[in-house]
Image: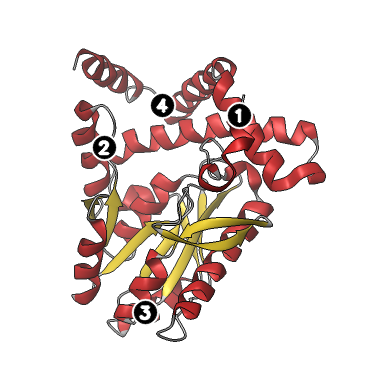
């Protein structure tokens, strides 16, 4: 609890600064964290080597490693700002691509399953989707330190995000879809044989969650991926990909729809690899040996 109080004091001081000064401070902290996080840096390099091999130069991989911390800093800063900003504040920094496709489904009262990843500034992406387009029910995983959970929930739920705990979340997402509401899922974290299906991801057989495809089949809801890019870390483009719908009631259709999601995700990561969250052990269920040492 004492640590959380120090954090609140830090946040109060940070928010007294101009936005440009806040970013400079957080980028400095990110650089320090990068230098200290030796074990985490090994995980990043293991992931990059496994995904790209020699297709990326060593210097490019080191640059991506460094940017992982900078991007995390931007997301943490965004959480702080989301506790205070409003929809108009978000709209000043967001531009949507292919929004007309989403608006068409919404005008037809069809629920949508939005999928995305820890790519770019996912905190501003989630807030902007819910605040500027449609309310969203999404999954929430509590932090290890319970004192911080109400803080994080406050930052996210003020922008029309309805958050449900990860354990048992599927039934809440199903209820929302049944009631004609939209839901969202982050699909890029590690999975396993119990909760996923095996797909091809960066030319490796990889378990991947099939939740979006299964919900889509049951509730006739299109799956629409959205990904976030920025050129200046101040203004963001949220791009909606072409919708994915499950073709049939068989497991082959589930697998095909899931592979299409993975293909879109890989395409986005390959185009802008520095924006993805390389810090986690994405392949630990299938190839844990790459993280040895």
Instruction: Judge whether residue 180 can be spotted in this image.
Output: no
**Crowding at label 3, few (<14), some or many (≥20) Cα neighbours within 10 Å?**
many
Between the C-alphas of marks 1 and 2, the distance is 33 Å
Residue drawn at (35%, 61%) of the image: 184
Image location of residue 106, percent across then percent down: 32, 78
State yes or no: discs 1 and 3 in contact (Cβ < 8 Å): no
Image location of residue 176, percent across then percent down: 21, 68
**Residue highlighted by disc 2:** 152
State yes or no: discs 1 and 4 in contact (Cβ < 8 Å): no
**Residue highlighted by disc 3:** 217
**Crowding at label 4, few (<14), some or many (≥20) Cα neighbours within 10 Å?**
few
Residue drawn at (37%, 65%) of the image: 211
**Residue highlighted by disc 1:** 292
Instruction: Judge whether residue 76 can be spotted in this image.
Output: yes
Residue 245 is left or right of residue 133, and the answer is right
Query: Mark 2 or 4 closer to N-term?
Result: 4
**Crowding at label 2, few (<14), some or many (≥20) Cα neighbours within 10 Å?**
some
State yes or no: discs 3 and 2 in contact (Cβ < 8 Å): no
**Residue highlighted by disc 4:** 18
Image location of residue 150, percent across then percent down: 18, 35
Does dot 3 land on a helix, a strand or a loop?
helix
Between the C-alphas of marks 3 and 4, the distance is 47 Å
Q: Using the image as rendered, state which of residue 68 and residue 254 is in the foreground.
A: 254
Q: Using the image as rendered, state which of residue 176 and residue 194 is in the foreground.
A: 194
* Number of on-image labels: 4
Does dot 2 land on a helix, a strand or a loop?
helix
């Amino acid at each position: 609890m004492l640590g959380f109080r120090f954090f609140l004091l830090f946040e109060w001081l940070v928010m007294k600064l101009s936005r440009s000064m806040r970013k400079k401070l957080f980028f400095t902290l990110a650089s320090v964290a990068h230098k200290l996080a030796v074990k985490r840096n090994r995980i990043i390099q293991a992931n990059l080597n496994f995904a790209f091999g020699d297709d990326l130069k060593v210097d490019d991989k080191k640059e991506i490693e460094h940017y992982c911390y900078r991007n995390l800093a931007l997301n943490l800063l965004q959480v702080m700002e989301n506790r205070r900003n409003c929809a108009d504040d978000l709209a000043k920094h967001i531009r949507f691509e292919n929004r007309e496709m989403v608006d068409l489904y919404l005008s037809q009262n069809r629920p949508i399953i939005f999928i995305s990843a820890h790519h770019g500034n996912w905190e501003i992406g989630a807030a902007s989707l819910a605040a500027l387009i449609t309310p969203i029910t999404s999954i929430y995983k509590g932090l290890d330190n319970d004192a911080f959970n109400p803080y994080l929930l406050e930052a996210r739920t003020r922008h029309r995000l309805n958050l449900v705990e990860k354990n048992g979340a599927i039934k809440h997402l199903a209820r929302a879809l049944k009631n004609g509401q939209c839901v969202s899922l982050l699909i890029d974290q590690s999975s396993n044989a119990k909760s996923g299906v095996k797909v091809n991801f960066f030319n490796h057989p990889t378990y991947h969650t099939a939740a979006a495809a299964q919900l889509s089949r049951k509730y006739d809801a299109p799956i629409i991926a959205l990904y976030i890019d920025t050129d200046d870390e101040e203004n963001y483009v949220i791009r909606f990909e072409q919708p994915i719908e499950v073709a049939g009631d068989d497991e082959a259709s589930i697998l095909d729809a899931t592979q299409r999601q993975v293909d879109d995700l890989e395409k986005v990561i390959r185009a802008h690899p520095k924006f993805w969250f390389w810090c986690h052990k994405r392949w630990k269920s299938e190839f844990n040996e790459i993280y040895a040492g």
